[in-house]
Every structure is written in structure tokens, then in C-alpha cells.
Image (cartoon, helix red, strand yellow):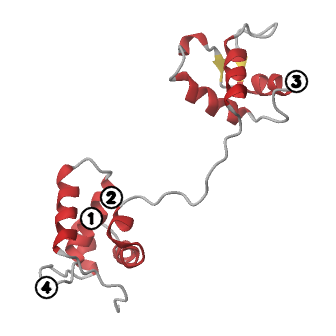
Amino acid sequence: MLKTHYVELTAADREWLLEFIGRGAAPAQEQARARVLLKADESPEGPAWPDNQIAEALELSAGGVGGIRRRFSERGLKGCVRRKSPDREYERKLDGEQEAELVRLACSKAPEGRSQWSLRLLADRMVELDVVDTLSHETVRQTLRTDRSKTDSSRIGVDNG
């Protein structure tokens, strides 16, 4: 197989990779990508291992090693090693006042005949109260999950069903 992407690291690149791996704080996938780059280094100081040897040594696929080489040539050192940020930004469905109203509602007494609020009941009630035009139970779940770290979770009795 003909290589189309070459990895040539500078001394500073190698030092950064070795320090990155040495800290051991990064996710395993990022550390594996760093190790691939160190083994694939084709500069005079590098070992220049072939992809199949790197794949075998690090228990990866040869295609995965090739992908890391490609990303190195496209994104550079840190862009290859670090996780890529998502391309899409997610817009918040509720603003601060709407979230506060949802939490207030979830902390209130459950409707007649219920021991606690369900996510769907909360979503429906928020629409009935004209706080929002539409609201899914999943948005309610995610919002309350986020707010539970800020409030006393035992006070919010919500049934996920």
C-alpha cells in the first residue's frame, strides 16, 4: 500500500507528545493517537514504523493508523491528537426564565391523582401555561438534569416514565 500522508515531527512536536502521554490525564484514544504519531515519525530522529507494525503494536487497525496520518497532514499535531469539536452548535431550547419556571413547576405539588410529575406532564403544562410554544419531554429531562446539580435533587420529584 502506497503512503500518501507522511508524518515528520520536529523536536518540539516529539517533546509535546511525550509530555502529553507522560501526564496520563488525556483520554485513551488521544494517547493512542499520540503514540501512533511517535511511531510513524519519518524525520531522521523518528522510528518510521510501517502502518501495519504500528497497528499491531498498539492494537489498532492499519486503516485507523492511516486515518491518523491523514488527520495529522490536514489538521496538524494538536488538531490530530485532540478530539475534534462538533461542527454543529446546539441552540438552547429554554432561556433562563423558562428554565426557572420549569424548575419551579417541577418542585411544585404534582397534579391531582399523581404522586409526582412525569416529564411529559411537565412539558405539556409548560405549553398550557404559555411559557413556551412547544416543548419535548427530552428537553425537560435534559434541563432538569442540568439544574439538579444546582438545586436540592430530593425536592424535584420527577418520574422519567
In the rendered image, residue 53, in percent from the top left (x then y), is placed at 22, 77
User: Where residue 128 is drawn, which disc sits there?
Assistant: 3
Distance CA(mark 2)–CA(mark 3)? 47 Å
Mark 4 residue type: Pro
Mark 4 or mark 2: which comes first in sequence? 2
* Residue 138 pos. (x, y %): 69, 35
**Secondary structure category for the residue under label 3:** helix
Query: How far, Cα to Cα, is label 1 from label 2?
Result: 6 Å
Q: What type is the residue that disc 3 sits on?
A: Glu
Estimate how packed mark 3 is, as few (under 14), some (14 to 19) or many (20 or more) residues with alpha carbons within 10 Å.
Answer: few
Q: Is tag 1's residue or tag 3's residue first in the polypeptide sequence?
A: 1
Q: CA distance from mark 4 to mark 3?
A: 70 Å
> Which quadrant is home to the C terminus?
top right
Between disc 2 and disc 3, whose residue precedes?
A: 2
User: Are discs 1 and 4 less than 8 Å apart at CB?
Assistant: no
Residue 34: which disc?
1
Badge 1 amino acid:
Ala
Q: Amino acid at mark 2?
A: Glu
Cα–Cα gap, marks 4 and 2 = 25 Å
Residue under the image location 22 percent in, 76 percent down: 9
| Distance (Cα) linking label 1 and label 4 | 18 Å
Are circles 1 and 3 on residues that touch, CB within 8 Å?
Answer: no
Of circles 4 and 2, the one toward us is 4
Local secondary structure at mark 1: helix
Point out the tag, 4 or 3, that comes first from the N-terminus: 4
Quadrant of the image occupied by residue 48:
bottom left
Residue marked by disc 4: 44
Residue 71 shown left or right of residue 107 in the figure: left
Q: Which residue is nearer to you in this view: 94 or 38? A: 94
Q: Mark 1, mark 4: which one is toward the viewer?
A: 4
List the residue tagged with mark 2: 30
